[in-house]
Image (tube, rainbow, N blue to C red):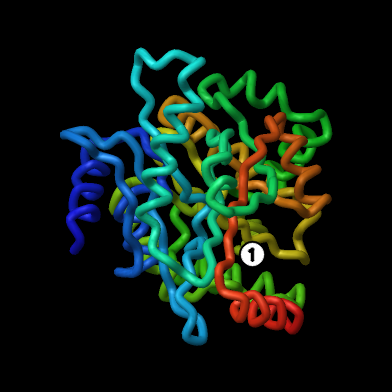
Amino acid sequence: MSDKKAIYREFCRTKGNLPVFLYDWWLDSVCGKNWNVALVKPDNEVLAFMPYYIKTVFGYNISVMPQLTQFLGPWINYPADLKETNKAEYEKKMMSELIAQLPGTACFDQNFHYSVSNWLPFYWKGYSQTTRYTYVIEDIEHTERVFNNFTPSKRKNINKASEIVEVKFDLGAEEFYENHKHTLEKQGQKISYSKELFLKIHEQVYAHRSGRTIYAVDKNGIIHSALFVVWSKYSAYDLISSIDADHKNSESASLLIWEIIKNLSGKINRFDFEGSMIESVERSFRQFGTVQKAYFSITRCDSASYKIFRSIREKFR
């Protein structure tokens, strides 16, 4: 294990307020051994860090997002006495040091957290940016206020669902996976992640008390929808949503969101829907009284042959 990785593991052990995707145990679950971290640690304090994942595709080493991971990107610990006028210069210094530590790869592709509003140091080093969006309820402590911020139609759907299904917690990992796989097959789609990966994540999330499955079942024992939600103190994330198309009209998925928010209220600061660029999904997320958050997808491809390979591969997907 690299010295940086060992330092980062100890850093994670002492920090309870990082987003869940940045913890070492999460990275172990989704990346195996193929992750490392850039660190700025001049003395005894980690000032900035940036985990990254390397995988090999047809002989090309690429740095990409691990599956089921919303973001990585740089994370900076700002000095308490840092003036706003000096913030951009401090970010330039930290990010430049992180970039210098990134390994050379055929392609780099990462999503940054929405709190990162300055990507100029990456631009100056030849990276490109695409803006994407997620949707967040910023304060879930006061559930009555949260519910009142839902649109009238969303509140009506939740009340409707509560009369049709019963909400339960802790659907088993294999059962959840098979349910999601089956609901996708009904729509002519294939599940995008392996059972092995999901079982690893599920095991670690439960071991660290950082997530739960929640599901809606009718009087006949049929599961209408199920969610896998993960969290740290910083935020909860709607990681996986499984909805049976045959029972979509029960509106049970909206009820599950509401129930998990109530369950987490007082323990977690915010709820992140993980975003979508699909118009109908985006509209549904907005109906929960969310705030739209822009985040950066940062890329750089240094291999001309990999660019051609990737364009051909995406064309025939």
In this rendering, is residue 19 above or below 138?
below
Toward the viewer: 302 or 54? 302
Left or right: residue 192 compared with residue 174: right
Estimate the x, y position of residue 49 in percent, counting from the top left: 35, 44
Residue type, mark 1 in image: Ile
Q: Which quadrant of the figure contains the N terminus?
A: bottom left
**Residue at x 46% of width, y 69% of height:** 105
**Can residue 258 be seen here?**
yes
Pick the residue in front: 87 or 221.
87
Q: Which residue is mark 1?
A: 222
The local secondary structure at tag 1 comes to loop
Q: Is residue 215 visible?
A: no
Between 47 and 24, which is closer to the camera in this rendering? 47
Residue 303: x and y in percent read 56, 74
Q: Residue at x 44, y 50 (%)?
A: 212
Neighbours of disc 1 within 10 Å: few (<14), some (14-19), many (20+): few
